[in-house]
Amino acid sequence: MNHEQQGAVWKKLNLGVCYYPEHWPESFWAGDLRRMKENGLGTIRIGEFAWSRFEPEEGQFTFEFFDRFMEYAAEADMKVIFCTPTATPPAWLTQQYPECLNGDKEGNLYRHGARRHYNYNSPRYREFSARIAEMLGRHYGPHPCVIGWQIDNELNCETNEFYSDSDHQAFRRFLQEKYGSLDRLNEAWGTDFWNQTYTDWQQVYGPRKTIHDTVNPHQQLDYIRFVSESAVSFCHLQSRILEKYKKPGDFITTNGLFGHMDNHRMADECLDTYTYDSYPDFAFALDADPVRSVDLNDRKWSRNLTESRSVSPHFGIMEQQSGANGWNNRMEAPAPKPGQMMLWTMQSIAHGADYVSYFRWRTCRIGTEIYWHGLLDYDSRDNRRIEELRRIRDRVSRMEDVAGADYVSSFGLIKSYSNQWDADADIWHRRVDAFSEREIFCGAQLSHIPYDVLYLNVERHEKAMTPERYPLLIYPHGTIVTDHEKQVLEDYVRAGGILCIGCRTGYKNEYGHCVTEPMPGLLRELAGGTVRDFTWVRPEEKTSMEWQGRTFDMPVFNDVLEAEGGRELAAFSGSYYGGKPALLEHILGRGKVLYLGGVFTRQLTEAVLRYAGVVSPYSSLVQAPEDCELALRRKNGKTWLFVLNYMSGSRTVTLKRPMADADSGQTVSGEVVLEAYGTRVYLTDGE
C-alpha cells in the first residue's frame, strides 16, 4: 500500500466500542446493539480473548456462539472488527503444551490465569495460532458485517521480555544468522570482559538471572532486537493468513504502542493501518505523584498519539478511555470528570485518529477488570457518560469529513530504534533521553509549536527529512550513530536544514561499544566541535549558560565542548568548567548544526525553536493560553482547528479571524470562553 497515506482506511470519522458477547447473556445482545447504534457507535470489536468459544478442545472447532451473535450484529447493521484470540491461549493448550508458555529470567513459567503468558517462538504455539487465524479468517472473512481484523491484542504489553526455552533457542538462531560465527559474536558482545567468552553455541542464551540482575549490555541490545523480530514475525504469521480472506476495503490492524518493538516495520510489513489504546486517566492514578504539572497530566497523552501518528499518519483508537480504570490487584484511577471523555476523544482526533472506539460498552462484572469501567456501569442504566457520548456523536457527525486530513507540524523530533533500545539497556542513556524527550514535548506544547516524530532507518521518514518539510530537526541524544545515519543527517543540513543535537551524542557504534574517536564520533565534523570533558550534574549543583539574553539551567548531564570549525554561542557557568563552551553553531552547506552540551529543558527547547525561526502554525488563527492544546488538520483546502482545555477551570482564547464553529455552524471570532475541560473545533478555508 501507499505508506505515505498509511492508515487512510476510514472514509469518514466514526465511532465504535469494544464488546464481549461471551461475558453477557444472549438476552442482552439485541438491546445492547440497539443502544450502541442509537448513541452513534457503528462498529464493535469482538473476539480477542475468546479462543475457547471457537476451539473448546484441541482440534474441535465450533462457530455456533459467535455465528448467533453475528446474526444480531447483522440485524442491527453493526460493523465488526474481528480479532484473533491469540493473546489468551486456552487452558487445554497450555496444560498439554507447556512449551508454549513464556517464563521469567530464572526459568519459571508463567501459568494459565492471566493473559499474554505465551511466547512468540514456540513452534507449537505458532502452529496453533496460525490454525485459529486460518479458521476464523475462512469462516468470518466473507461476512458482510466484518470490515477489519485485529491481530492478537497489545503485542508486547504486560511483558516485552521472553525467556522460554523456545526463545533461547530462537535467539541462538537469530545470532547465528546475524553473526555467522562465535568469533564475531564474541567480538560484538565484548565477551573478554568478565570472561564471558563463548566456545559453543549451546552456551549462548538470552539474558538470565545474575547478581544484581547485571546483563552484558551488548547482549541486551541484541536481545531487544530479537524480541522485536519475534513480535513482528508473530504478527506477520497471522496477517499473511488473514490477507487471503479480506474483502475489498477490509483492513488488518493491531492495537497498542509497546516497547521492544519496531512498530514501523510491523505496520509496513503486516498491517493496513495502526491503532492505539489511549488511557489518559493513568495521569491521575492514585499511586502517581500528586504534583503532575511537570508532565502536563492527561495532556501528555498527546505525546503517545504523536508516536502513533509516526507509525501511521492516519490511525485509529481501538480503546479510548471512557471510565475509571484499574484491575483488582493494581492500577487505581478515578472516573473521568464531566467533559473529559469528550476532551480525550477530541485529543485523539486532533492528532490524526479517524476512528475512535471506546473501551468498553459494559463494565465487566467478573474477572480481573471489574474496575476497568466502560460506558455503562454494572446496572446498565443511562448515565452521564452516555449523555456525553451523545454530544460526541453529534459533534463527530458534523465533522466526519475530517477523516484523512493531515496533522500540521512545524518541526521534527528524530529517533532511531537502536537508540531507543540502547536506552532500555543503558541507564546512563535512559536518564538523559527520558528527560529530554519529556521536556521537548512540554516545551513544544506550551509554545504551541507542534512536531512530528521521525525515525532514522524508516525509509518514508528519511525521505520526509527535508528543510522544506521540517526546517528544524532535533536529535536529542543519538548515542548510536551509523555511517548511513550520518549521511542522512548531513544531506539534510547541507540542503538548508537546521539540526540540533545534545549531549551524549555519537559515542557508541551499532553494537553499543563506546568508540575510541572523540565524541560525537561520526558526527564530529558535522557538529563542528568535540567533547573535552563530561559529567553528571550533582543534585546540589546549579550549572547554567547564557544565550539570547537569557540564563538557562543546564541540569542532569553536561558535555564540555570544544569548537572545531563551529563557533561558540554560549558558555557554561556554575561549575569547574565554567567559561567552557556549552553551545556551538556550525554552518555546513546551506544549513547549520546546533550542538548543545546538555539535555533539553522546556525553556531551552523554546529558545532553540525561536532561534531556528520555527513559528507556530496557529499564530494567524488563534491566541491561546499555555493551558490549552492547539492542533490543526488539513485536507483539500480545508483546515480544522482544535482547541482543547485540560484544566478544571475555564480558559479564554481569541480567534483572530472569522471561523465556522463545527458544532453550531455559526461564524465566530474574537474572545471565546472554554468551560472546564472544554473543547472547540473550528473550520476555516485555506492555509
Image: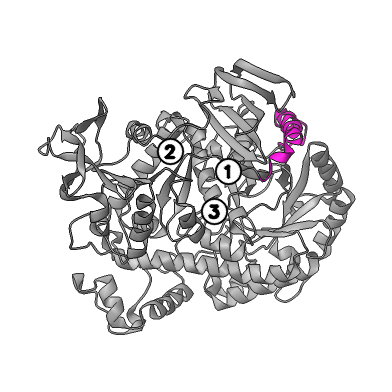
Residue type indicated by callout 2? Phe
In the rendered image, residue 604, in percent from the top left (x then y), is placed at: 32, 34
Marked residue nearer the N-terminal end (3 or 1): 1
| Other-residue count near label 2 (Cα within 10 Å), few / some / many at <14 / 14–19 / ≥20 | many
In the rendered image, residue 196, in percent from the top left (x then y), is placed at: 24, 74
Marked residue nearer the N-terminal end (2 or 1): 1
**Number of the label disc, if any, that sits on residue 311:** 3
Residue 186 in the magenta stretch? The answer is no
For the residue pair 176 and 532, the one nearer the viewer reads as 532
Residue at image mark 1: 278
| Other-residue count near label 3 (Cα within 10 Å), few / some / many at <14 / 14–19 / ≥20 | many
Quarter occupied by residue 583: top left
For the residue pair 570 and 676, the one nearer the viewer reads as 570
Residue 511: in sight, yes or no? yes
Q: Which of marks 2 and 1 is in front?
A: 2
- Marks 1 and 3: in contact by CB < 8 Å? no
What is the magenta segment's predominant secondary structure? helix
In the displayed structure, 282 sits above or below 668; it is below
Quarter occupied by residue 361: top right
Quarter occupied by residue 622: top right
In the rendered image, residue 283, in percent from the top left (x then y), is placed at: 49, 36
Residue at image mark 2: 441
Using the numbered discs, state the Cα–Cα distance from disc 2 to disc 3 in whole angstroms.
18 Å
The stretch of residues the image draws in magenta is 376-404
